[in-house]
Image: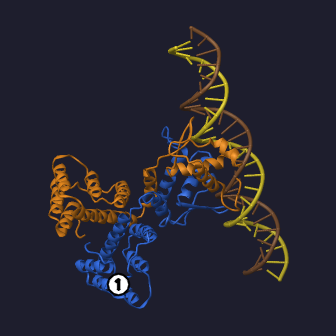
Chain colours: A orange, B blue, C yellow, D brown
Amino acid sequence: MSKPNSDSKVYVEIVKQLRLLIEKNHLKPGDKLPSERELSERLNVGRSSVREGLRALELLGLIETRRGEGTFIRDFEGHQLVQLLSTFILQDDKAKKDIMETKYLIEIDCLWLNMYKATDNELTELKVWAETATYTDDEFFLKVVQYAKNHLFLRIWTILKDYYNSLQIAQETPKKTDYSQLIEALLNRRESEVREAYRTLRKLSNI
Amino acid sequence: MSKPNSDSKVYVEIVKQLRLLIEKNHLKPGDKLPSERELSERLNVGRSSVREGLRALELLGLIETRRGEGTFIRDFEGHQLVQLLSTFILQDDKAKKDIMETKYLIEIDCLWLNMYKATDNELTELKVWAETATYTDDEFFLKVVQYAKNHLFLRIWTILKDYYNSLQIAQETPKKTDYSQLIEALLNRRESEVREAYRTLRKLSNI
DNA sequence: TATCATAGGTGGTCTGACCATTACTCTTAA
DNA sequence: TTAAGAGTAATGGTCAGACCACCTATGATA
């Protein structure tokens, strides 16, 4: 290691060096990293230390290793991370409640945004789909969130959804009429009606 | 490893086993994990593999290791998750509108949560503070978000706030009366009143 | 030219060794 | 009896070397 920088652990230094290497060489997802042995030599550290760093990055979903081939930069979508963290973090009930609560409120936010942003055409189209097609709850609300036309909400909701599903909460599937009524309320552009429809769909007492 | 389960890598199995161990023994943040050598023996794997798993968890902020002492579960109530998620939530979405919109809606969500969760005492205390102390808008809403008692919202809002501030949006500072009226509305537990007060404070036409 | 066996490179894992730091234990002195 | 100290055990940190399993490219052979 060029700069052990006193007390920092070697594997952390490896991670930093790898980041620099990626940045310097403009490496993109799919590109190959140097082999473990080469990194070990170039950085003047043991191969096991290199591996500790690589394994951490792999668990984060930032790289991908294929035996016999090498280590590659990954096009990370984050699902790996979500899965892993959820199993650790979601142990206490408080966190579970937070996730449910947040997901619900953001769904309502997106419904609200729909009232102002979605066109009648879009909503009508959505309604037809909701009444004819077969879909999961996630698929329905994905459309709702998409129509809200806010990329941030889309991203946040997507992550929340993954966490939420990993909770394995027993829950009745809403009826088809619940969904179409919700959209009907959106078409009427009546906030209270929308909230009421959502409450019914999710079987919530308040909100 | 009792069940190598075909192709899964050993260090991933280690991570799983550790999770089970934590769950089974009801280990809390601060508690000590078995030593690397003991884990290596108990799970019948090499110590280096154990270390790969532990290092990954450490980089995620889930555990903490102290040389000479041992490995401990960390209080991951905290920021590690946010940090990691934020990098890919907000990496290229700099759309001003989205950030503003999301921040406002989440602030309203938190206000709403306050109506149900915050005690009269808390709100009164907050009101006194709002009328006497000097504070920034961020500081005020930080308290609001905190009183909402939802860590997820707290994390999301904190990130949004930073991005929002980096946008350098010209905006009038709300008056002190705006803040106290908002809290007054919370104390009355009237949703419409709260929304109206927030609208006034942010000088928004709708929402 | 097409096919296939071989060798070399790569990650995956284990073992054993040594160091630095901390915790523990037991002796010794006040 | 108690407090201080020295010595020992345990722990994480790191390295080196050895295999193995797998993939790829090379090159010889049919």
Label 1: how many residues lie within 10 Å, few (<14), some (14-19) or many (20+)?
many
Rendering quarter of residue B72? bottom right
Query: Can residue B42 be spotted in the picture?
Result: no
Rendering quarter of residue A192? bottom left
In percent of width and height, residue B87 lies at: 47, 59
Query: Can residue B75 be spotted in the picture?
Result: yes
Tell me what residue is drawn at x 53 percent, y 64 percent: B74
Rendering quarter of residue B93? bottom left
In percent of width and height, residue B115 lies at: 29, 78
Tell me what residue is drawn at x 41 percent, y 72 percent: B169
Query: Left or right: A120 with respect to B204?
Result: left
In percent of width and height, residue B150 lies at: 38, 70
As drawn, the residue found furthest toward the front would be: B170
Tell me what residue is drawn at x 49 percent, y 67 percent: B78
Q: Nearer the viewer, residue B47 or C2?
A: C2
Quick check: C18 above or below B32? above
Image quadrant in which the C terminus of chain A is located:
bottom left
As drawn, the residue found furthest toward the bottom would be: B132
Query: Left or right: B100 with respect to B25?
Result: left
Question: Which residue position holds label 1?
Answer: B179
In percent of width and height, residue A181 lies at: 15, 59
Q: Nearer the viewer, residue B3 or A74?
A: A74
- The chain identifier of the residue carrying mark 1 reads B
Query: Left or right: D17 with respect to A29?
Result: right
